[in-house]
Image: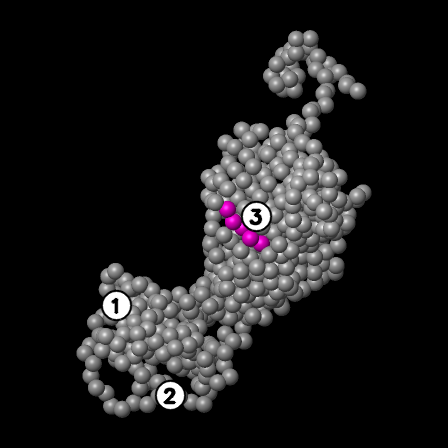
Amino acid sequence: MAFPIETIAEDNPVAALFSGGRIPENGRMSVKLLPETLINQIAAGEVIERPASATKELIENAIDAGATRIEIATAGGGKSLVRVTDNGSGMDAADLELAVRRHCTSKISTTLDDIHTLGFRGEALPSIGSVARLTITSRRHGDPSGFQVSVSGGAASPVKPAPANQGTVVEVRDLFFATPARLKFMKTERAEAAAITEIVKRMAIAFPHIRFVLSGSDRSTLEFPATGEDHLARMAQVLGSEFKENAIEIDAGREDVSLSGFVGVPTFHRGNSAHQFAFVNGRPVQDKLILSAIRGAYAEQMPAGRYPVAVLSIDLDPAFVDVNVHPAKADVRFRDPQLVRGLIVGAIRQALHREGDRASTTGAAAMLRAFQQAPEQQGFSETSGSSFPQRSYPLSAPPQTSWSASSSPSRPLDMGVAPAYQPRPTQTGFDAFAMPTARADVIEETAYTPETTAAGYRLGAARAQVHENYIVAQTEKGLVIVDQHAAHERLVYESLRKALENDRLASQVLLIPEIIDLPEEDCDRLMVHATELDRLGLAIERFGPGAVAVRETPAMLGEVDAGALVRDLADEIAEWNTASGLRNKLEYIAATMACHGSVRSGRRLKPDEMNALLRQMEATPGSGTCNHGRPTYIELKLSDIERLFGRS
């Protein structure tokens, strides 16, 4: 039944808006039922944003069908062709007829509280068919033949028999031909092809027991063989073997939520967040809450502008998470978001506390590349006068210009010219290895003692100090080079952080309490966290229904705008139900104090001081990076050193 809508006046802007800027001649508008094709095209605008969106929906259908092998072929960045072939359960004629109609699905029945499949909305296939040329060919296991249905621009053809293997082949051609305006917003074919690749990678990480093959005329073939239950092996296929060598396992739980996966050590990072993967009940998501928690867990351990590598999987009761937030199903909403965030941050920090102070293998690789060989030393050959058989060692190409000490970023502070070498009396211990230079770049007066042996120490025993900043230590399996300033900075900072956790921070009492006017609900939230804030040196109390009185502020902050601080905390509590902002401010100040209070570059250390620093690093969690996220040491295996000299 159509209900007439009375227009108010011809100059009414609201009436003009609803009529597209024009008033009907008869002054009346009627509510109409949109055509089915137009309804599907409107739905497609939300579900199918680009070729990668269509590919994602088709892969999800294949996974829900129980496929163990999925092949994706594309052309023109997916705009000309997307073909997804699987060996799943397949569909019969009746299933195909309903599959291309909106809101028809086999995955849910009456409720959204118990979703265990990737798809459930029943919109993907009709949405694709409304804006493209869609063909589905499928055969169930045991059926003598398959069936095929086609949809072009929203018009479906009758289902007909067709030859087919077990499983389903979905072919999408000329995407958005029925909505040409959408084509104008597509990116280049290379960019669209790259987006499809990212979708396949995320699906491959989530389902390691499935073999994925991505090919086509617009790309080189990419294959991810099935790895069964070995998730780390699949991650290595997608993220590279370096991730496997630098990964820390995560396995934690809180209440009814469990968290598993792998994260990289702090010194193993990337230039963007594209290497952070999150899955909720097996569903790949790009949730801001999860990404924010990962970033918070690595605070003070990641350089500015760098991002950690992480693969996290969250499992919880489907009733506690809403996956129906957006038609694309990329966002989710947790019933208790603070619980999930706290679990992620706590689990990652605990893992970093356990293993995160180890050096990444990328540091050693970069050091090996930094060592340059002369052109005549790039390989050994019998014709060059060497008795070694001809071999080649692929190191970095030699620099275009000769190395200059004056332009080196690692040059000593005093670039004086070293005097000519003069023979010295026979020396023992550390001093025997020291060549005389203008600044004695290698520390002297060191003797070997039983306490300085490398056995039993992860960071070994100090053997030298070069350029008055880098400690060279010998380990049982190689050597370690330590940045003394960065390492001591982390040690001082962790000591200050421990003081923050164990004792009430010193505060300064205000002569006149500062009264901060706030909405009543903000005051209520602040008073809930008043005890926690008091431990951090911020003493507040209620001052009427719509104000709080600030009586003490943290002494570490010095002169502080108490009003701005309290308002920021109120905003943070309203959004996240936590008052961690003040702690973050204090930790930032502690990091600054640690930087200025640590041993400076250019200071000579005695052997006992160097070894004491190494022992403290071994006992301090997170000592692998400084407060700014830079590595504090680089480890070089003996096998790497031997490879430099062609001994392996």
Q: Amino acid at mark 3?
A: Ile
**Residue 33, position in %: x, y?**
72, 23
Label 3: element kind: strand
Of pointers 2 and 3, the one earlier in the residue sequence? 3
Q: Compare residues 319 and 299 and report the one nearer the observer.
A: 319
Disc number for residue 375: 1
The reply to whether the C-beta atoms of the residues labelled 2 and 1 are less than 8 Å apart is no
User: Quadrant location of residue 453?
Assistant: bottom left
| Left or right position of 87 against 452 | right
Disc number for residue 447: 2
The reply to whether the C-beta atoms of the residues labelled 3 and 1 are less than 8 Å apart is no
Q: Which residue is mark 3?
A: 72
Q: Is residue 37 visible?
A: yes
Label 2: element kind: loop
Residue 214 magenta-highlighted: yes
**Residue 399, position in %: x, y?**
28, 62
* Residue furthest out toward the front: 144
Q: Amino acid at mark 1?
A: Pro
